[in-house]
Image (cartoon, rainbow, N blue to C red):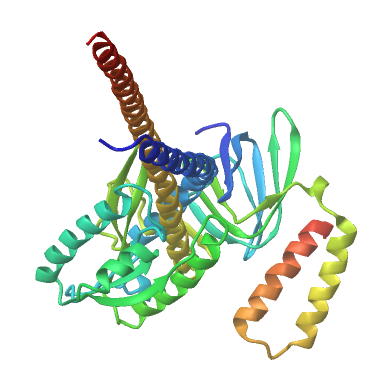
C-alpha cells in the first residue's frame, strides 16, 4: 500500500495541482469526507466549497472549488471542477454581500423552477465558500 | 506584350492582396496560439472526465439511466458536424465535407435515417443543397462562447436521445494534431455503451463506493459529460481551423511573392525592350539622315 496519495486538481482552464498529498478533505454532496492513502475506489459529486489537503512541503493547503467530481482510485484522487480559487485572493466582503443577496433570493423565490433554485443554491455555496463559512 | 502601365497596376494589386493575406496569417497565428493553449488545458480535463464516466458506465447496467440505453437497432443516426463559418482556410472545409459525404453514403446503408446538425456555416451550406435531412444549425461559435453553445447543444442532444428521437449521436470534427496536421474524427457521443469500455481491470461494482447513489451520480455527471465532450470537439475544431487558415495564408503569401517576382522580371524585360526599340529608332533615324546627306 502506498504511503502517499497522488492528487490531481483539474479545471477546464488548467491543471491546478498535481502532486503527492498526505490527506485530503473535500466537500461531498453527502457531507464532507476525508481521504487517506489506501482508500477504496470511491466516486463522489462535490458541492462548491473548500478543499483542504496536506502536503509535505507546504503543509495545509486550502482551495475554493466550484463543485465538481472526486474520483478516488488506486491512491490517485482526481478532482474535476469548473473553477478553483485561492482563498487568499478572494474579496471576502464582496462575497459576504453576495451570500446575503443569494440567500434573500432563495427565500423570496420559493416557487422558482428547480433548475433556477439549483443555480442559486450553487451561487450561494460558492459565496459562502469564499467567505469561509 | 502588355504595356508598362498594365504591369505596374498588376504588381500593385498583387502587393495589396499579399499584404492582406500576410495580415490574415498573423491574425490566424495569434488566434491559433490562444486556441491551442486553451485546448491543451482542456484536454486533460475532458480526458479525465471521460475516464470517470466510462468507468462508471462500465460498472452500470444500461437500465440504470436513460443515457446509457443501448438501442436494439441503429435506426436514427444524428451527426453533429463541425466546420468553420468562414473560408480562406485552405482545404479545411472541403476535406471535412468530402469525408462527411463518404460517411453519409456509408451510413445510409446501415442506418434507417440520418440527420445532420451543424456547427459552422460551411457544412450547412453544402449539405442543405444536397438533400440530406438537416437539424439544428449553429454559427458564430468562437473560443469565448464555446461553453455557452456547448451547454445549449448538450441539453438539446441529451433530450433528443432520451426521448428516443435519435438512437445514436456522433460528433464529426477535425482533431487538432499539430499546426500543420489535423485529422477528421468521428466520435460516438451517445449511447455510452459499457461494452466498448471493457478494457479489463475494471473493478466490480461492489468494490466501488458511490456518493450519492450510483443512479444519482450518473444522472448528474452524464449530461455534464455530454457538454464536456461537445465543448472539447468545438475547441479541437476551432484550433484546427486557425491552424489551417494560418497554413493557407502562409502559402498564399509565398505564392504572391512568386507572382510579384515574375511580374517584376516581366516589367524589366518590357522596359528594356522599349528602350531598345527607341534606341533603334534613333540610330535608324540618324543613319537615314547621314545617308541622305551624303547623297
Q: Quadrant of residue B102?
A: bottom left
Q: Image check: B214 left or right of A56?
A: left
Q: Quadrant of the N terminus of chain B?
A: top left
Residue A31: name its quadrant: bottom right
**Residue at the farthest bottom position:** A111
* In the depicted structure, whether residue A107 falls above or below residue B283: below
Q: Is residue B282 above or below residue B78?
A: above
Q: Position of residue B240 (x, y in %)?
A: 40, 47
Q: Please give the name of the residue rendered at 51% of the width and 56% of the height, measured from the top-left corner.
A: A43
Q: Point out the image quarter for the C terminus of chain B.
A: top left
- How many numbered marks does the figure carry? 0
Image vertical order of residue B127 relative to residue B40, above or below: below
Q: Is residue B178 visible?
A: no
- Residue that appears at 13% across and 70% down: B108
User: Horizontal placement of A53 versus B38: left or right?
Assistant: right
* Residue A28 visible here: yes
- Residue A44: percent from left, percent from top: 55, 59
Q: Residue furthest front?
A: B295
Expressed as whole percent of the image width and height from the top left, the position of residue B159 reads 40, 79
* The one of A67 and B74 positioned closer to us in this rendering: B74
Is B185 left, or right, of B236 in this rendering? left
Amino acid at each position: 500500500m502506498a504511503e502517499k496519495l497522488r492528487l490531481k486538481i483539474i479545471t477546464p482552464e488548467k491543471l491546478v495541482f498535481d502532486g503527492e498529498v498526505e490527506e485530503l478533505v473535500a466537500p461531498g454532496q453527502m457531507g464532507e469526507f476525508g481521504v487517506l492513502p489506501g482508500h477504496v475506489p470511491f466516486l463522489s459529486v462535490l458541492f462548491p466549497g473548500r478543499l483542504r489537503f496536506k502536503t509535505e512541503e507546504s503543509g495545509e493547503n486550502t482551495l475554493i472549488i466550484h463543485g465538481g467530481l472526486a474520483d478516488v482510485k488506486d491512491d490517485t484522487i482526481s478532482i474535476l471542477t469548473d473553477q478553483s480559487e485561492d482563498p487568499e485572493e478572494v474579496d471576502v466582503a464582496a462575497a459576504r454581500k453576495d451570500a446575503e443577496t443569494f440567500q434573500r433570493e432563495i427565500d423570496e423565490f420559493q416557487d422558482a423552477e428547480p433548475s433556477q433554485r439549483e443555480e442559486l443554491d450553487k451561487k450561494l455555496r460558492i459565496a459562502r465558500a469564499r467567505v469561509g463559512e | 506584350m502588355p504595356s508598362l502601365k498594365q504591369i505596374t497596376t498588376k504588381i500593385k494589386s498583387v502587393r495589396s492582396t499579399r499584404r492582406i493575406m500576410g495580415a490574415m496569417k498573423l491574425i490566424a497565428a495569434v488566434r491559433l496560439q490562444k486556441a491551442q493553449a486553451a485546448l491543451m488545458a482542456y484536454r486533460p480535463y475532458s480526458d479525465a472526465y471521460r475516464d470517470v464516466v466510462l468507468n462508471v458506465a462500465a460498472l452500470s447496467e444500461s437500465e440504470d439511466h436513460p443515457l446509457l440505453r443501448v438501442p436494439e437497432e441503429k435506426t436514427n443516426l444524428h451527426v453533429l458536424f463541425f466546420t468553420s463559418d468562414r473560408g480562406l482556410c485552405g482545404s479545411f472545409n472541403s476535406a471535412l465535407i468530402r469525408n462527411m459525404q463518404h460517411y453519409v453514403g456509408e451510413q445510409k446503408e446501415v442506418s434507417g435515417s440520418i440527420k445532420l446538425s451543424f456547427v459552422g456555416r460551411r457544412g450547412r451550406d453544402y449539405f442543405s443543397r444536397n438533400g440530406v435531412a438537416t437539424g439544428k444549425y449553429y454559427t458564430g461559435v468562437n473560443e469565448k462562447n464555446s461553453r455557452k453553445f456547448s451547454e445549449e447543444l448538450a441539453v438539446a442532444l441529451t433530450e433528443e436521445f432520451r426521448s428516443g428521437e435519435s438512437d445514436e449521436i456522433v460528433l464529426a470534427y477535425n482533431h487538432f494534431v499539430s499546426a500543420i496536421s489535423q485529422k477528421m474524427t468521428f466520435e460516438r457521443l451517445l449511447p455510452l455503451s459499457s461494452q466498448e469500455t471493457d478494457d479489463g481491470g475494471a473493478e466490480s461494482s461492489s468494490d466501488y463506493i458511490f456518493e450519492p447513489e450510483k443512479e444519482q451520480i450518473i444522472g448528474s455527471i452524464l449530461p455534464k459529460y455530454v457538454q464536456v465532450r461537445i465543448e472539447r470537439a468545438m475547441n479541437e475544431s476551432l484550433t484546427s481551423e486557425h491552424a489551417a487558415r494560418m497554413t493557407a495564408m502562409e502559402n498564399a503569401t509565398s505564392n504572391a511573392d512568386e507572382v510579384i517576382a515574375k511580374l517584376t522580371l516581366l516589367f524589366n524585360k518590357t522596359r528594356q525592350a522599349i528602350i531598345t526599340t527607341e534606341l533603334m529608332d534613333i540610330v535608324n533615324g540618324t543613319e537615314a539622315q547621314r545617308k541622305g546627306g551624303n547623297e
